[in-house]
Amino acid sequence: MKYIYHSPLRWSDMDAYGHVNNARFLTLYEEARVALFFTGARQMGLTSFEDGIVIARHEIDYVRPVDYGDPVRIEMWVEEIRHSRFTIAYELIDREVVASRARSVCVPFNLEFQRPRRISEAERAFLAEWMAPA
Amino acid sequence: MGHVNHARYLTFFEDARMELLARSPHGLGDSVRGHEGGGYIAARVAVDYVAPVEFRPGLTLRVRTGVAKIGTSSWTLAGEMDDDGTVVARCEVVMVAYSYEQGRPRPLDDDERAYWETYEAQ
């Protein structure tokens, strides 16, 4: 199942080239991720992601520029689940055209011990819900 | 968590990149203040987060940028960010020389190629 998030653009998301700045794409993707893993998970009674999750890596491909205008649609799904990390994949769609694709490697993190921790069974079940069909 | 937000790292790497671009033969490229002759797009960015950075007064992060690869119309910049010698992140950016006029990639010209070659990893 894919998670769909509509993100408005802000005027200040644009840079001197008149396009949404490439670094801001990451913030738009982050909005979608936070909506699912914090707000969405909480609604399902899962709050452990809020206790600490770090990003180990981001990859972003820019397919076409995005101009200021209507909200963009972000489609997001879980690509891979491992013992102590999972990968999220996204597409950013502007006016029905894919403008960017991205991937984030997320690591649940124990802030108290300052080290990565294993993904719990409840988390795994939640993540599995959002695995895209192959 | 009190850490520097991961999306901001991209902006730090970008600041370093824009400084390099500004000094390159075609400057920041067209579509900025009507400059003509060349343009660029960032086609792909990958960032690895090595260590968290906590804000503190006077915190200054250093970014070192080199060229990892040069192709016909694209080149790859590799950046490393450190906090007082401790590496906190690495970034790889694929840049494409682009003609906004023609709406497609353009080959790097000789001056540009020579400029970027001076930043190739030793």
Image: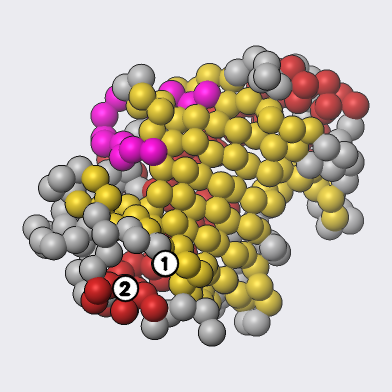
Same-chain status of marks 1 and 2: yes
Residue B11 in view (yes/no): no
Does residue A38 lie above or below B92 as drawn?
above
Report the amino acid beneath label 1: Ile
Is label 1 in a helix, a strand or a loop? strand
Residue B10 in view (yes/no): yes
Please tell me whether the stretch drawn in magenta is mainly helix, strand or loop: loop
Kindly identify which chain the residue marked by label 1 belongs to: B
Nearest to N terminus: mark 1 or mark 2: 1
Colour basis: secondary structure
Residue on which disc 2 sits: B113
Left or right relative to A39: residue A109? right
Residue B34's disc number: none
Report the amino acid beneath label 2: Arg
Specify the quadrant of the image occupied by residue A77.
top right
Residue on which disc 1 sits: B70
Residue A134 is situated, as x and y percent measured from the top left of the image, at 68, 19
Residue B66 is situated, as x and y percent measured from the top left of the image, at 48, 75
Left or right relative to B24: residue A45? right
Highlighted range, magenta: A63-75
Q: Residue at x 16, y 58 (%)?
A: B30
Q: Nearer the viewer, residue B24 or B60?
A: B24
Q: Residue at x 71, y 48 (%)?
A: A54
